[in-house]
Amino acid sequence: MSDSTDQAALSALFREAFGVSTPHFETIKEHASKRRIYRLRDQQRSVIGVVNPDRAENRAFVEFAKHFKKNGLPVPEIYCSAQDWSAYLEEDLGDLTLLDRLQCSRDTQSALSDALLALYREALEQLCRFQLVAGRGLDYSFCYQGADFDRSAVLGDLRDFREQLLQPKRIAFDAERLQSEFDLLANQIASYPAHYFMYRDFQARNIMLLNGRCWFIDFQSGRRGPLQYDVASLVYQSAAALAPSEREALVRHYLAEACKLEKIDTAQFVDSLPTFAIIRLMQALSAYGRAGLRDGKEYFIKSIPSAAKMLTETVQQSILAARLPEVLAVASKLST
């Protein structure tokens, strides 16, 4: 679809929402997504317009955003959506992400500043509300990639890791051993309680900073799942490169907040977190393979070694480390 077609569709929504048309358009980088994202401006307002051929994905985002907004969570307001779910307009939260702020700070200091640490804590406090409060009344029929992060969903992510990354990069592996380790990981993940809202892509790039506070986007892949996955997604994000001590402090903060809402086996949570991080890092790496190796987006190709290095280190920390030699071997090959 051409930019002119996108702009015509979004201009119609703009007119429906605000009674005026012909806004100024600015294209926004969409990263790995198939979504085409624009900033629409007139003299009174600035909004974000999204056009996406995956209408089920659009519907999930719009309906989830409305639900979270009703529950008082800091997510963008939805102004208008097309009847066929092909496009929508949402609140403009600006361009600054938590990851942007973190990476800028790396120029002057390696450790998290007090201000950044406070933002990470705020993000985890809000995560508790997504998972343990708003998730209770969510209509999971809107989930477009399956309503549950169960054993089959884990195996699907691991299969993508093999097919989208290992095979295109011609990484040698023992297929039978690797599949056996995939089965082990899936069984382990499936053994934990999984009736919470799982954001799925809870990372610093999806946390916007506006007026000094955290706002949240890109939760359309959410589903029912375990608590650990989202925490691992944030604190083990390879691009953020948090120090182990920072990671541990943030996990303690999350658990203190979550335990105010529900009784949690904190020792089990901490022990299991590296295993969840393995799954998350492999999912991220498969996305890098798809966007980088298949679609030719250089940013994602460059992201593979650092994420693979984080995966290597995380496998070594896991309670399953001795039982994952093939995963460790392929991660080591990817990191060089």
Image (tube, grey):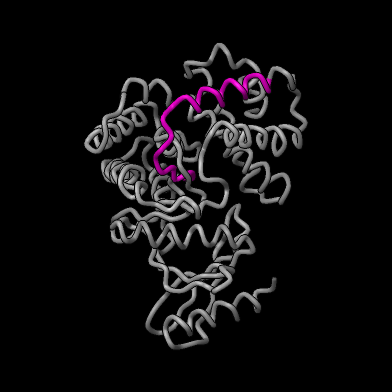
Q: Position of residue 302 (x, y in %)?
A: 63, 42
Q: Residue at x 39, y 55 (%)?
A: 208
Q: Residue at x 44, y 45 (%)?
A: 199
Question: What are the residue bounds of the magenta stretch?
Answer: 178-201
Q: Nearer the viewer, residue 249 or 107?
A: 249
Question: Dividing the image into 4 quarters, which one contains the C terminus?
Answer: top right
Can residue 241 be seen here? The reply is no
Does 229 sit above or below residue 146?
above
Q: Position of residue 284 (x, y in %)?
A: 57, 39
Q: Is residue 180 magenta?
A: yes
**Residue most extreme to the left:** 260
Q: Nearer the viewer, residue 101 or 171?
A: 171
Q: Residue at x 62, y 29 (%)?
A: 335
Which quadrant would residue 124 be assigned to in this image? top left
Q: Position of residue 186 (x, y in %)?
A: 56, 26
Which quadrant would residue 35 be assigned to in this image? bottom right
Can residue 21 be seen here? The reply is yes
